[in-house]
Image (tube, rainbow, N blue to C red):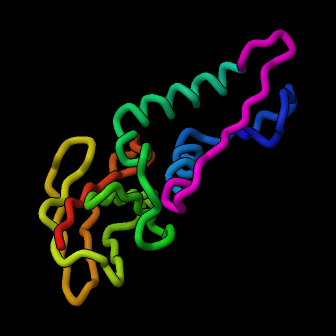
Amino acid sequence: TMNNSWGFNITDTSYKTPKQLVDFLVKAAGYGANLLLNIGPMPNGEIQPEFKERLAYMGNWLHTYGESIYNTKGGYIRPQSWGCITQKGDTMFVHVLNDSSTTIQGDSFPYKKIAKAYLMNNNSVIKTSLKNNVLNIEALKKDADEADEVIVLICKN
């Protein structure tokens, strides 16, 4: 739910932030699952403005980053404290959800080479290294306005 109630509750104003909702969506995808996000209409049938704002935020986020969620599977490792990975074919999407993460490490990396690594929102090159099947990514400090920094890895065997 977007707050703590399954239906409309005028006294429940503990709304989840847009970032929290994106985190739920991304982590669900990182586990290879779907997210069911419940909203309850008001007695007059309308949707609360707070819900509309959050749904619009998520829609805009998906407009930019939807490729990293739609038709993907969970990454080769389960979600971690820094975030998670989704995957489509030989492309991995590294979702950095934790603002304090500056380096990401992935043990038992399933590919032999990373052909390209870049930020999904602006194509900036990201530094990576792969040694003894251990992936290291130097994550940039993400923009405070971004709920998720998505790093695209084009992998090769």
Q: From the image, which quarter does the C terminus lie in?
A: bottom left
Q: Residue at x 41, y 71 (%)?
A: 76
> Please, is residue 131 above or below residue 147 in the view?
below
Q: Is residue 39 left or right of residue 28?
A: right
Q: Residue at x 53, y 51 (%)?
A: 23
Asked whether residue 140 is in view, the answer is: no
Q: Is residue 20 left or right of residue 104?
A: right
> Please, is residue 101 above or below residue 63 in the view?
below
Q: Nearer the viewer, residue 55 or 140?
A: 55
Residue 12 is one of the magenta-drawn residues: no
Could you tell me how many numbered marks the image carries?
Answer: 0
Res 63 quadrant in image? top left
Q: From the image, which quarter does the N terminus lie in?
A: top right
Asked whether residue 50 is in view, the answer is: yes
- Residue 97 in percent (x, y) is at 45, 57
Residue located farthest toward the top when viewing the structure as drawn: 44
Q: Residue at x 57, y 29 (%)?
A: 55
Q: Is residue 69 left or right of residue 31?
A: left
Q: Residue at x 84, y 27 (%)?
A: 8
Majority secondary structure of magenta residues: loop
- Residue 116 in percent (x, y) is at 14, 60
> Where are the magenta residues, as a range?
28-47
Q: Is residue 11 left or right of residue 73?
A: right
- Residue 10 in percent (x, y) is at 85, 26
Res 47 quadrant in image? top right
- Residue 78 in percent (x, y) is at 50, 71
Residue located farthest toward the bottom when viewing the structure as drawn: 132
